[in-house]
Image (spheres, helix red, strand yellow):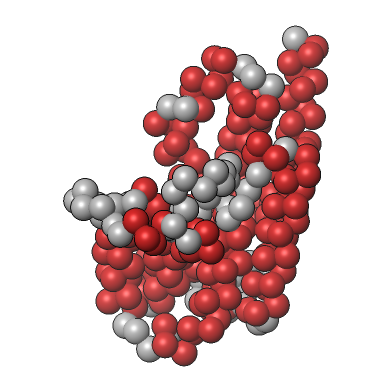
Amino acid sequence: MSPLSATNGRIAVLDWLKAAAIVNMVLYHALYDAAFLFGQPDIQAFMRSSAAFWWERSICGTFILVSGFLSLHSRRPFRRAIRILGAALCVTVVTLLFTPQFIILFGILHFLGTASLLTALAAPVLQRIPAYWGLAACIGLFWLTRTIPYGHWPWGTPLPPILYDVKFLLFAGFWPAGSGLVSSDYFPLLPWLFVFWAGLFLERAMRGTHMEAACTRIPSCCAVQWLSRHALAIYLLHQPVAAAIVWLILHLA
């Protein structure tokens, strides 16, 4: 268990971070539904803005970083990874059947399940890398690979087009150009795996530091713990509930 663990086995600071991300996720998707599912033009303008883009990235980045932080503390890492991948498959099937225009092929859950599986497999190697070196490498590699899904290096040099002609590489970040495929949520391994592993190395780097001591003094909250503990179920169920509430608001207003 992480050195930041409270006596009840929960890590308060991570619970607060996950709960904040969950609340923001529900709000973001409610606005997304209002904008694109129910065609509200004013909200569409906001959801296409850079503010909405960075809002969404901060939500998902928090989930990824926290998941990486805890990745080597799961008692059954392979079982956990398979469970997340199973939930991701359900998301793909449901979106394909009911909202094919908003299908999710490799979204945040697909990424988290795959990253968890890769981390469990690579754990013996990752644990031998010094924490600060690993954290620095993850930051550098994230910067280096952050534009791969867009077909070029950060300095503008195009990547070989052949990498984007193979559909099965979309999970890695090489979205097949001209394939006609769409995904309303897309978090490939490159560059996001390095955010996941940054969380892993951050947990180790914090051990025995003043930051760790400060985090252990953060109070816990039952409601926050409940949100954090049920994050996966909330993710799977909140979309239809949010869409129904938005529909009611729009039709009763």
**Residue 27, position as x, y percentages in the image:** 62, 34
Q: Is residue 150 visible?
A: yes
Residue depicted at x 50% and y 41%: 56
Seen in the picture, residue 120 relative to 222 is either above or below; the reply is below
The residue at the point 75 percent across, 18 percent down is: 249
Residue located 75% across and 52% down the image: 93
Answer left or right for 51 relative to 31.
left
Q: Position of residue 9 (x, y in %)?
A: 65, 72
Query: Where on the picture, by quarter, is residue 148?
Result: bottom left
Q: Position of residue 2 (x, y in %)?
A: 53, 76
* 109, 209: nearer the viewer: 109
Q: Which of 14 and 251 lies nearest the eye of the viewer?
A: 251
Relative to residue 202, is residue 101 drawn left or right? right
Q: Quadrant of residue 24?
A: top right
Q: Please name the residue shown 69% across and 22% down the image.
A: 38
Q: Nearer the viewer, residue 50 or 208?
A: 50
Of all residues, the one furthest to the top in this rendering is: 253
Say above or below: 143 vs 198: above
